Amino acid sequence: MKAFVMHEIGKVGFMEKPVPEPGPTDVLVKATSALVCSSDIHTLSGAIGERTNLTLGHEAVGVIEKLGSAVEGFEVGQRVAINAITPCYQCLNCQTGHTSQCTQALGGWKFANVKDGTFADYFVVNDAKANLALIPDELSDEHALYATDMMSTGFMGAENGNIPLGGTVAVFAQGPVGLMSTAGARLLGAGLIIAVESVPRRQELARHFGADIIIDPFSSQDSVAQILDLTEGRGVDTAIEALGAQVTFENCVKVTRPGGTISVVGYFGEGEYVNIPRIDWGVGMAGKTITTGLCPGGSERMNNLMRLIVNKRIDPTPLTTHKFSFDELETAFKLMETKEDGIIKPLITF
Amino acid sequence: MKAFVMHEIGKVGFMEKPVPEPGPTDVLVKATSALVCSSDIHTLSGAIGERTNLTLGHEAVGVIEKLGSAVEGFEVGQRVAINAITPCYQCLNCQTGHTSQCTQALGGWKFANVKDGTFADYFVVNDAKANLALIPDELSDEHALYATDMMSTGFMGAENGNIPLGGTVAVFAQGPVGLMSTAGARLLGAGLIIAVESVPRRQELARHFGADIIIDPFSSQDSVAQILDLTEGRGVDTAIEALGAQVTFENCVKVTRPGGTISVVGYFGEGEYVNIPRIDWGVGMAGKTITTGLCPGGSERMNNLMRLIVNKRIDPTPLTTHKFSFDELETAFKLMETKEDGIIKPLITF
Amino acid sequence: MKAFVMHEIGKVGFMEKPVPEPGPTDVLVKATSALVCSSDIHTLSGAIGERTNLTLGHEAVGVIEKLGSAVEGFEVGQRVAINAITPCYQCLNCQTGHTSQCTQALGGWKFANVKDGTFADYFVVNDAKANLALIPDELSDEHALYATDMMSTGFMGAENGNIPLGGTVAVFAQGPVGLMSTAGARLLGAGLIIAVESVPRRQELARHFGADIIIDPFSSQDSVAQILDLTEGRGVDTAIEALGAQVTFENCVKVTRPGGTISVVGYFGEGEYVNIPRIDWGVGMAGKTITTGLCPGGSERMNNLMRLIVNKRIDPTPLTTHKFSFDELETAFKLMETKEDGIIKPLITF
Amino acid sequence: MKAFVMHEIGKVGFMEKPVPEPGPTDVLVKATSALVCSSDIHTLSGAIGERTNLTLGHEAVGVIEKLGSAVEGFEVGQRVAINAITPCYQCLNCQTGHTSQCTQALGGWKFANVKDGTFADYFVVNDAKANLALIPDELSDEHALYATDMMSTGFMGAENGNIPLGGTVAVFAQGPVGLMSTAGARLLGAGLIIAVESVPRRQELARHFGADIIIDPFSSQDSVAQILDLTEGRGVDTAIEALGAQVTFENCVKVTRPGGTISVVGYFGEGEYVNIPRIDWGVGMAGKTITTGLCPGGSERMNNLMRLIVNKRIDPTPLTTHKFSFDELETAFKLMETKEDGIIKPLITF
């Protein structure tokens, strides 16, 4: 079968691999569509170290091709969504509810990290009982794809933020995850959502997904000052960091009211430290909480997310800015690296 | 009346002040005993800026001398404990439950900050209905004093830590607040408590208050490595920062398991930033939560804390290492500044 | 001034009363508009015992006429909303966050219970600092009125229900509170909302406020069976009881999945007991939680609710089915008693 | 091998069964010791319907005899504790954290319910990765047995009760589960624990495990009145129902303060309904929460519980009042049925 791999840091390409065999609790899935994620780009650039001929990809839907010997409750031919994160659900961390931290920090992330990813004609889903969700007939593949990572990760940003009903939220950066944090804040009842973003297309999408006010961080007025003004000097109940940068993290701490929450969904890829501004943090005493997390997985989660699409709470597909066939995946990767042509998410069809 | 004041940064002394008059919702209290807090020392050294002839002190018990015109439910002559933090309970922040952040960050802290403190023959308690607690007959003044700040602040470190019953906890630094965090972790059902402290007397008290294992941070082996060893490499469920220093904060992040909590009770007095070690923080994705807070106040809180003493769950008085009369308060301050003579808490009697 | 009172159980009418004088922490408000609540009808019929010439009414907006001597932060002439519940915020129950249970069970409810209500030219708001919220210019009196009780109470039904994002909810009964629970479930991200209601106008409003599916409890098929069918036999994550009747309470327990929540917002006015069906409750072991509550009050709450209206998350005014002048209040009461003419909420203008 | 079975309702006895074969994710355990649980008695009397030759027992420790083909992380010969509840951890209910409700209400309970129990020379543990915990060398089999059900269930009563640090708790009934709820409340920082129990031996144990005050429900004074007196008329923060009877459930509602929690751990075996006293429940508005649950399982849980024993927080073995060999199991059952001879828990040795 054909697989799109990372030969080594910085070098991608297609190669032939044998169709993998599912273990007793696994399921083999035939890929039908996929999305490319910035994490794939980070991986390629060496974020998790060297990898050799590792198949990339972790946002996928497909059709069940073969069941492991101990798998019950599914049938060959069913159309399924597979979360980017595929925990075991049974280790000590999973038992505490921190399934994305399966076995170890970030350990729920297995595709294109510790095992072959989903950019291949076929791929194996571990612990299939928990990690596969049937796609409702009402939903297209494209819809379902967004339940595998973008909605789950972005919404988590809002869920971790402890937003009071009618409360105020600022979301820093409106890439696909930030946009889904904006949408998540809206879904969870925020009364005022301020999105910080400079790219016009992303600003538009931010409005589309529920932002009330857009602040351009490169405008003449400081975005922290603007947010404080918009909240009568009190700061927001919840600030969501969706970029993974020192400046936005720091601004999150600054705009959050005493007793509020800074919810991090961005990936921090650089530097030895991420720095908390001491005074704005209330010298460690202002009751500001900083939360983090990694994409919540599982069939229950995906069912809930897909229900939101079925019942018209949200349509995530405006995130799709480009479409490619599997053969053209390298082009999609290049665009995602350069962020050219206003790309947000490219849809890949097999 | 006599008051012990901060004349200016770095300069303390006694002065005569008129007995203050309570407003409609206030109560005037005649001081009977007090404790000196490190915060008093920080204030004196300029931590909150210049102050002129401000009466110091915020850990106090006394006897009700006079009731404000609108105060009900108390009587002159009652023996009362007054929390270090005296919020209004009615502003927007208070209404959200973040009473220590009354009106603004740290705004519940009024004594010896925005109004005269308790080191005086008489002092006024604002919003008396909520900020006074009757002292049970079974308790001495000294017992009750510990409910006004040390127990409340230290225990909060444990309460914010989300400790699972039987879980593992590391407490960094065993000053009076850290010791009470250790005691709090014990009271809340931690199954293993590791205290990090180098001073022998504090190590002893840590054991006394519930630590199972003491680690000397200046021993040859790294304390982070020791804590990871003691938890089979998994890290603790909860790390409590009770020093307010970069090194201990950083170590807290390092020793906390994915999905665990770093609970800050230390006061961070220096530097522009407090730095989170990026990789140990799971690049912002390991589900580690960082919480902070300021001494919870109120009569309900003090009642609960005093009940723990009455019913023999804890006796905080081993924290008292020295005793002075009000006249000797300057000596007590000097000792607290230098931490000489193994001082932990000096009891002041009026 | 003119006041609309309950002379005795079952007997209402207008009478002259002197304009009341605000105490030090009170504010005197000149009424401008009001809503009639079913609770007024319950009170009139004797639900809380005999009352003599007690002014009725507790959903009101008005203009500040006079400030108590100790009140700061407000000015005469400001347009304000007053919550139906006016706690002290300072007693022991209030300090725990259960402000609606001020001093004692349901003790936050003071208007038309332990003090004169708001159906008068002027009325006094106790503990004004916390119990008054300025009405934004964008909002009409009618808008703001819904923030004083209906939205707060109904939304609480959803907030107490622990609804997972995208989860399933059933709301039993679609009176004004039930409709606001439906709206609240929608605002909080429920993925499927099933409303149980037989009255066509209320069914329509249920759809308007966010219900996906309406079940008529008097149709041929059992509503419990229908709800289980709609959730693949699993039951809903959250069932909201908004009627206060044995049959709906019992059905809530039956349709809630193991581990789910039954959230009660209905007033239970009859019988010695409310009965939990033992087997459906999992013989006390199915992890089903039953929560209750009384309208959350306070300015912070009302600010949050009004923000939802300002920013177009919800417009509660379709609940207003009738309009009367203050003079016609007795007519409005009669309609509320009989529920004739499809009445939901009558708006009263002063 | 020899197995102790329920031949039919009301009839037990030994019979020969073949040693079972573990499936791919199972482990075969050789029993070494066990405890008899009241649930076994309920099962025998028909509580869950007819069963034919079903092996009884669900509180067991043993030694690993054989690993399923897909099981990693364990070795033959290891000494292990097995929780009474053995969920799959991967179904939808398990994914929400309600593992004891695996697949369906109470579905995590499999031993001696839907599969053979542990009263046999060998038994099979499903989903072994999550359901086995290694026993620390410091602990005897007897110690570890209490982590499999009694401590986990009883402590859950306290954990679900939302006890504030220093708060007040009443525990109704001091059988083995109630005693462990008392111990749990103590471990979690309750400031006052009132145990309601009439049997002298159980009263003594209640004191031993942490009760401050014992109330005899058959004494001349009403236990509700006594508890209200002991809490200045306010009621307790948390009432724990550990009997499963109408009278104690009702009393729990009566003694719980507004905003407090009634935590049910008793098994309710009789009647169509369990009845909530309407007025004491605050007509559905007093903010009283009623929680329920079934023994939390899993290796993480058992590790935490065993850590509490290792580090001397608790020694559960005073619950053992009788000891029998496996051959004498029928005698133990008889005693558990009649509760004669002051039996609390009989230890069975293989």
Image: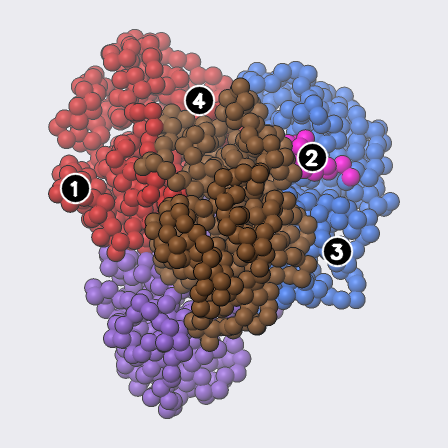
Chain colours: A blue, B purple, C brown, D red
Query: Residues in magenta?
Result: A297-318
Name the secondary structure under disc 2.
loop
Rendered view: D348 above or below D20: below
Residue B123 drawn at (x, y percent): 36, 80
User: Do the residues at pointers 2 and 1 share their chain?
Assistant: no
- For residue B217: magenta? no
Q: Mark 4: which amino acid?
A: Asn
Q: Mark 3: which amino acid?
A: Ile
| Quadrant of the snapshot with the N terminus of chain B | bottom left
For residue C28, side relative to residue D40 (left or right): right
User: Do the residues at pointers 4 and 3 share their chain?
Assistant: no
Alpha-carbon span between mark 1 and mark 3: 65 Å
**Which of the numbered marks, if any, corresponds to residue D126?**
4
Q: Give the residue number, with chain letter if any, for mark 2.
A: A312
Q: Is residue A74 visible?
A: yes
Residue B74 drawn at (x, y percent): 30, 70
Q: Mark 1: which amino acid?
A: Asp
For residue C98, side relative to residue A148 (left or right): left
**Which of the numbered marks, if any, corresponds to residue A214?**
3
Q: Give the residue number, with chain letter if any, for mark 1.
A: D216
Residue D260 drawn at (x, y percent): 36, 48
